[in-house]
Image: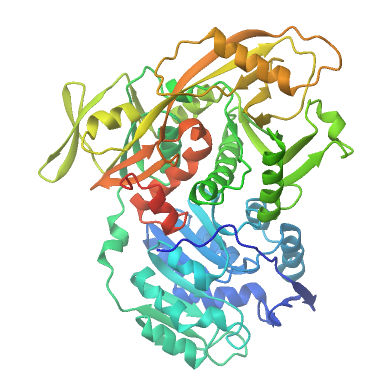
């Protein structure tokens, strides 16, 4: 499959409001019927697909909407889902070529439907206007995957088993691209057994297109004064996508940030989860970094790695933010700086910012002509301001408490020595005792993977990194500063400096030479206003991380019920939440949160 170039330019929705009805000025068509926005959506899409009953009877429902618009169908679906108790996993996917800016969306919803209990929850979690796939968690069992771009182009990149199709683009007369036979034909690949669809349109071309896609089509009464609408049921068979095949149990080998992210998310979705960790505690070894950052790296790498890195950064910010609302995890958000190492790099960073075309509160180039630049206390004359950077301060103990308060079982000091199949069922040997695996198995520890899968070459290499807490600097600064490694202020007044990079080294002994490199980083970045700093190393940390030869992670199925989640290098805290979501989506039959072509690029079988 040919990868869609990324990023693509996203033009926000252009609109007008007339008598409480929001109109698209691009397509000269309203977003909803003047007879009542929410009433129309409930009649056509909720009742048209019998969603109340199906939410009560199903473990998961995947809905695909063509035309997210104002999010009215999503809000109506949330109401119907909550009315049935919210136990069914709601997997909602929506295409939108012209998404609203958040402020405009809030204004339009206020004018059209007034107050709604869930509007603020939804708008707060919407991604920036960046093309491609964006998975956001609205509630633990409600996920929204927004695909910003042309549905006719991006539909080939969607991997999903769709139970319900909402066809809600603008009128076929005004927006032909959303109602083409080619687009309808793609539904045959995506539809689950028994899938249904509904649409306000009764156009004969739409009816013929859905029949050709494999649906039995009906023509019931339309909403309000509209004579008819279309509904239908998929008559094909997709047994591999049956709802009843969702596994309930998950065993995870490796209790680092990858295994813990996966375990916490799987428990939220109702799975019975067990972590087996060979160390004396989860969140040890390479995941015991005292101050990891969650941040994007701004460069002209817009290939698969750059694209994945942006998706992962946005997903991680959402993941840790959501966890921190239920219990403290040492999470702190602020702006951050990325400093160029040369004129060439600065020009590339500026070009990348222009291509990404994000708002200034997301990315902004600063130089010493800027009014606020002198307040940054740095020795550089140029920097890129990143609107949101996450810091996890001593997060390991907090994440352990989250695990203790969840349904996750954690077994420590246990080594998995062998994988075996017995009568078609997967088993492992834990120390000297056999152990039968119920459900799926995910291997997250690189050392275990090499031993348990000797015939699978994941091309992993060890990389040693050291961080040093530096004290004695007389300058305070508000933001993490990134470039050649990073520096970030700790709560006790010191500065953590990190950035050594030793490929092929497996030693975790802290080195004085690396302390000197990390102290030099602080001295080279911070301005001391003529004061002579006396920098010293208070403490240091060293850890081993594993990366692949192509610097992309491994996330996916190896064989049968065995999956791999590893190879993050120094990006573990940023990449773990999204890759965990990719693996879980595959296990549970949910839509994939990234493009099919991108999923192949992180498959553990790609080499």
Residue in view at x 45 percent, y 74 percent: 49
Q: Answer above or below: position of 490 versus 35.
A: above
**Residue 284 shows in this picture:** no
**Residue 566 shows in this picture:** yes
User: Is 567 on the left or on the right of 288, as rendered?
Assistant: left
Examine the image and state in which quarter residue 25 appears.
bottom right
Residue in view at x 38 percent, y 53 percent: 600
Residue in view at x 31 percent, y 62 percent: 241
Examine the image and state in which quarter residue 79 appears.
bottom right
Q: Answer above or below: position of 162 versus 336.
A: below
Percent coordinates x, y for residue 129 in the rendering: 65, 57
Quarter occupied by the C terminus: top left
Q: Which residue is the extreme one toward the left?
A: 423
Quarter occupied by the N terminus: bottom left
Q: Count up the numbered dots.
A: 0
User: Is 153 on the left or on the right of 118, as rendered?
Assistant: left
Q: Nearer the viewer, residue 590 or 537?
A: 537
Percent coordinates x, y for residue 51 in the rendering: 46, 68
Picture colour scheme: rainbow
Q: Answer above or below: position of 8 versus 321.
A: below
Q: Nearer the viewer, residue 518 or 407?
A: 518
Percent coordinates x, y for residue 67 in the rendering: 58, 71
Examine the image and state in which quarter residue 207 appears.
bottom left
Percent coordinates x, y for residue 214 in the rendering: 34, 81
């Amino acid at each position: 499959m040919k990868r869609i170039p990324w990023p693509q330019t996203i033009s926000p929705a252009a609109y007008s409001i007339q008598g409480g009805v929001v109109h698209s000025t691009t397509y000269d068509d309203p977003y909803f019927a003047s007879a009542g926005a929410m009433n129309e959506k409930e009649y056509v899409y909720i009742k048209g697909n019998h969603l109340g009953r199906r939410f009560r009877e199903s473990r998961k429902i995947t809905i695909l909407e063509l035309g997210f618009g104002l999010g009215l169908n999503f809000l109506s679906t949330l109401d119907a889902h909550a009315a049935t108790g919210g136990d069914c996993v709601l997997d909602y996917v929506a295409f939108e070529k012209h998404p609203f800016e958040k402020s405009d969306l809030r204004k339009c919803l206020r004018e059209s439907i007034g107050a709604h209990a869930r509007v603020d929850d939804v708008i707060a979690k919407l991604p920036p206007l960046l093309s491609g796939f964006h998975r956001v968690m609205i509630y633990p069992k409600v996920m929204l995957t927004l695909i910003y771009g042309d549905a006719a182009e991006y539909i080939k990149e969607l991997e999903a088993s769709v139970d319900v199709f909402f066809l809600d683009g603008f009128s076929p007369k005004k927006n032909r691209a959303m109602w083409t036979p080619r687009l309808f034909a793609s539904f045959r690949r995506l539809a689950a057994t028994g899938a249904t669809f509904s649409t306000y349109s009764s156009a004969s071309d739409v009816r013929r297109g859905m029949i050709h896609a494999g649906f039995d089509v009906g023509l019931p009464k339309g909403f309000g004064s509209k004579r008819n609408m279309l509904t239908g049921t998929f008559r094909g068979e997709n047994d591999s996508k049956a709802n009843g095949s969702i596994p309930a149990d998950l065993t995870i080998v490796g209790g680092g940030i990858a295994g813990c992210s996966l375990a916490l998310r799987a428990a939220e979705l109702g799975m019975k989860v067990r972590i087996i960790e060979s160390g004396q505690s989860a969140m040890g070894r390479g995941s015991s970094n005292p101050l990891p950052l969650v941040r994007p790296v701004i460069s002209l790498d817009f290939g698969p790695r750059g694209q994945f890195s942006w998706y992962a950064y946005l997903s991680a910010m959402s993941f840790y933010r959501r966890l921190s609302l239920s219990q403290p995890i040492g999470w702190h958000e602020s702006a951050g700086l990325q400093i160029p190492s040369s004129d060439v790099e600065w020009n590339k960073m500026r070009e990348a910012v222009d291509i990404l075309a994000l708002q200034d509160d997301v990315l902004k180039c600063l130089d010493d002509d800027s009014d606020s630049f002198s307040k940054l206390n740095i020795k550089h004359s140029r920097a890129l301001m990143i609107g949101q950077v996450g810091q996890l301060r001593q997060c390991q103990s907090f994440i352990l408490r989250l695990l203790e308060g969840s349904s996750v079982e954690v077994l420590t000091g246990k080594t998995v020595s062998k994988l075996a199949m017995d009568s078609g069922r997967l088993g492992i040997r834990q120390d000297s005792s056999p152990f039968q695996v119920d459900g799926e198995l995910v291997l997250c520890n690189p050392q275990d993977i090499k031993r348990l899968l000797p015939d699978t070459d994941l091309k992993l290499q060890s990389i040693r990194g050291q961080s040093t807490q530096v004290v004695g600097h007389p300058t305070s600064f508000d933001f993490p500063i990134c470039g050649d490694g990073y520096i970030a202020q700790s709560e006790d007044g010191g500065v953590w400096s990190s950035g050594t990079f030793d490929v092929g080294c497996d030693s975790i002994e802290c080195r004085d030479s690396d302390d000197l490199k990390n102290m030099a980083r602080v001295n080279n970045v911070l301005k001391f206003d003529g004061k002579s700093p006396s920098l010293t190393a208070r403490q240091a940390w060293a850890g081993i991380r594993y990366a692949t030869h192509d610097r992309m992670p491994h996330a996916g199925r190896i064989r049968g019920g065995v999956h791999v989640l590893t190879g993050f290098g120094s990006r573990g805290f940023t990449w773990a939440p999204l890759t965990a979501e990719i693996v879980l989506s595959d296990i549970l039959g949910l839509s994939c949160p990234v493009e099919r072509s991108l999923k192949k690029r992180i498959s553990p079988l790609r080499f």
